[in-house]
Image (cartoon, rainbow, N blue to C red):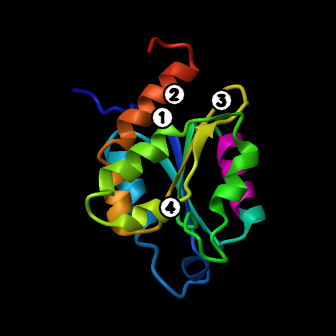
Amino acid sequence: MSPALDGLQVAVVTVSDRSAAGARADATGPMLADRLAAAGAAVAATVVPDEAGEIRRAIEAAVASGARAVVTTGGTGIGPRDVTPEATAPLLARSLPGIPELLRQRDAHLTSAVALSRGLAGVTDGSPAALIVNLPGSVRAVESALAVLPELIAHAVAQLDGGDH
């Protein structure tokens, strides 16, 4: 069986003030990059601070460079510096609320804190369009998301390219 993502360009954007400053190792970005690459994706990864403008520019740059999917990790909570959803929202032409709903449901039995995640998902209005998914910054949440993310990315991009449902 061939890898699900079969060479698809995917960008991983870690959103963390401490990791961007070098004060803490990025735990979730490399995990995402490694697992998406193992699923066949061509992955580019970057780390940015919790600044809406920098997050937005990183996503836009990834899409401009050919990424068909951008997965962010971090900045989806309710803390004063958690601005990933606000940075992402203006880039989405169409929202896909089912993706964050699915991801929260997968972990609801582990912790009620999933209800505090504000991550978004949707598609851009470019040609070609790209999928954007916000994940929390916790290792457990990212690990859980990786169980379904490669298939979701592959299916979403196929639909964006005119494939069947």
Along the line of sight, which residue is nearer the eye, 5 or 160?
160
Q: Are marks 3 and 1 in contact (CB under 8 Å)?
A: no
Q: Nearer the viewer, mark 1 or mark 4?
A: 4
Q: CA distance from mark 4 to mark 2?
A: 24 Å
In terms of secondary structure, where does tag 1 sit? loop
Q: CA distance from mark 1 to mark 4?
A: 27 Å
Vertical arrangement, residue 8 with respect to residue 73, above or below? above
In terms of secondary structure, where does tag 2 sit? helix
Q: Give the class, few, some or many, for how many residues have Cα within 10 Å of label 2's Cα (few <14, many ≥20).
A: many
Q: CA distance from mark 3 to mark 1?
A: 13 Å
Q: Nearer the viewer, mark 2 or mark 1?
A: 2
Vertical arrangement, residue 86 with respect to residue 99, above or below? below
Q: Is 57 colored magenta in this rendering? A: yes
| Visible residue check, residue 107 | yes
Q: CA distance from mark 3 to mark 4?
A: 25 Å
Q: Give the number of the disc on residue 8.
A: 1
Q: Give the class, few, some or many, for how many residues have Cα within 10 Å of label 1's Cα (few <14, many ≥20).
A: many
Q: Is 83 colored magenta in this rendering? A: no
Reading the image, the residue beneath label 3 is 129
Q: Nearer the viewer, mark 3 or mark 1?
A: 3
Vertical arrangement, residue 67 with respect to residue 21, above or below? above
Q: Quadrant location of the N terminus? A: top left
In terms of secondary structure, where does tag 4 sit? loop
Amino acid of disc 3: Ala
Give left or right: position of 41 versus 118: left
Reading the image, the residue beneath label 4 is 117
Q: Residue at x 41, y 35 (%)?
A: 152
Q: Nearer the viewer, mark 4 or mark 2?
A: 4
Give left or right: position of 89 versus 26: right
Q: Earlier in the sequence, mark 3 or mark 1?
A: 1
- What range of the chain is rendered magenta? 55-65
Amino acid of disc 4: Ser
